[in-house]
Amino acid sequence: MIARAGFIAAVALSMNISFSFGQDASTKPSAVAKSDEKVLGALPDKRVNEVVSDDGCHYACQVNNKIMVDGVEGPACEQIINGPLMSRNGLMVAYIAKQAGKFFVIVNGKAFPGLDAVEYIAVNNEGTQASWMSTRNNDRYWAFFTNGREVKSLEKPRRYHDFALGSSGKFVYWADIWHSEETPPQEDGRGRGTWRQHLFVDGNDKGVFAEVAGKSISISPDGRQYSAAVTFDDQRKKWKLIVNDAHWAEYKEYGPVCYAPDGRRNAYVAKSLAANARPHLVVDLKEGPEYDQIDEKSFTFSPDGSRFACVVVKQEKNLLFLDGREYPLEQKPKSIHFSPDGRAMAMVVPKGDKQQIVIDGKGGKEYDEIALITFSPDGAKLAFAAKQGSNWMVVTDGKEMPAYANIHTLRYMPDLRRVAYLVSKGGGSQAIVVDDQEAGEYPMIASGAPKISANGTLEYLAIKDNKLIRVTSRPPAKAPAGSIKEVQPQTQPAK
């Protein structure tokens, strides 16, 4: 949605890290760079269900019985059922509408018949695929569609649960099926028999179980992988975690599955059936050693999925588990971060009531809070947002930028030396800043801004005079001297 001053809090510590260690702030904002504005349309005061793309360049909302996309209102509908949904890059907007008593799915302005009703809808991150599930024949059948093409139809279960629809169109659910002991079989729930639970993936029956654990179904971020916990044991003492159709060992307990960004790798915590068993760390379906404790919240895959790290406790000592090896930790980190290629790693570590970035066992300057840890695309540099007192500043290359009331985004410019970020100012307005130069100030700027093109042009949406405008600006080609030497972890494995 459109970011308002103070509306978006600084990113939580789950996104913190950094290469640069800050010095005392001495810079002040320089003159505002010239910006070009294009009015996209007037924004009504009453608008709901606002969504915005990750880069802050596309915006959609509901205005009464219409959907507005980038300032342009769509056709009026009898009723908006669900929406708008927007792909992360903003290239696809989809929603469910009702007109003349019939349901439709609207994808980028094109209407597809929704049959009796539309129950679920999803779009992928790339904005190339919209998937939805409709019902037909008086709610007796399910029909699954991708970009308007029907890909599967099946009889609707009478009792189904935990339906999950992934962004790629994969769907998973479990259903109660009556197993009759009479010949011919009686209708559901009649005569002798029992209810059994079946797991279905893309409409295919994966087997009958005593139970499919409630709320255990998950689908990976890329929408192509899934997991679910099941048991054949009527006593519910032995559980199997199914990950991508693979049955793994039986467990007494299990934790949620964490996926790598591309969905190809996974990790979770489980306890074996042995008496007094301690938690196992399971990575890529391979059981690792037992630990006294395993911090599931610390699970971190590198952006390219090549590396995995988390915090474990053995003999009352905190250890960093990194790619199958253990390293001692003086303090339990608040968060772990990898560079895009996975070659460099940094941690945000508490120190008293302060926080600092730690790389190769060396801590940087302490701040009240650290957030928005951002590696450069080549992984050689790192910038972050730091809080001192009531103000926030960006720290890059050891240099502290001007202080603001809040900082919401942080990205490297194409030259890999400067950074661009969205801030809230003390007077209630917002601005885009490049290093120490403001490149545009408005009452409201879209969260996620700015988008940065290869030539360094900044683009984002803003609100001024109740109008949605598209802003483009080109800051001067100015880059600070110096750079940060890439740091590789040198810590010795724990003995």
Image (cartoon, rainbow, N blue to C red):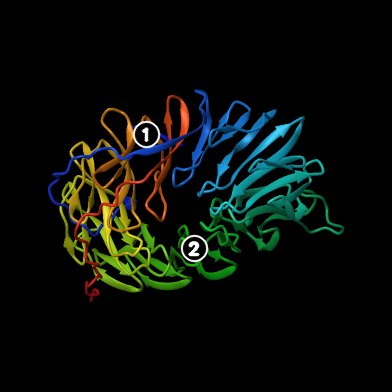
**In this rendering, is residue 82 above or below 76?**
below
* Residue 276 appearing in the image: no
Residue lying furthest top: 45
Q: Position of residue 404 (x, y in %)?
A: 24, 37
In this rendered view, identify the residue nearer to me: 7 or 232: 7
Residue lying furthest bottom: 495
**Element under label 1?**
loop
Image quarter of the C terminus: bottom left
Q: Mark 2: which amino acid?
A: Asp
In this rendered view, identify the residue nearer to me: 126 or 200: 126
**Element under label 2?**
loop
- C-alpha span from label 2 to label 1: 30 Å
Q: What count of labels does the image hold?
A: 2
* Residue 214 appearing in the image: yes
Q: Looking at the image, do the residues carrying marks 2 and 1 touch, with CB atoms under 8 Å apart?
A: no
Q: Which residue is mark 2?
A: 262
Number of other residues with Cα within 10 Å of mark 2, as a class: few under 14, some 14 to 19, many 20 or more = some
User: Which circle's residue, 2 or 1, is located before the other in the chain?
Assistant: 1
Number of other residues with Cα within 10 Å of mark 1, as a class: few under 14, some 14 to 19, many 20 or more = few
| Mark number displayed over residue 448 | none
Q: Position of residue 478 (x, y in %)?
A: 26, 52
Q: Is residue 327 left or right of residue 46?
A: left
Q: Position of residue 114 (x, y in %)?
A: 73, 42
Q: Is residue 61 left or right of residue 386?
A: right
Could you tell me which residue is drawn at 47 percent across and 70 percent down?
Answer: 284
**In this rendering, is residue 310 above or below 156?**
below
Q: Which residue is mark 1?
A: 7
In this rendered view, identify the residue nearer to me: 381 or 370: 381
Q: Mark 1: which amino acid?
A: Phe
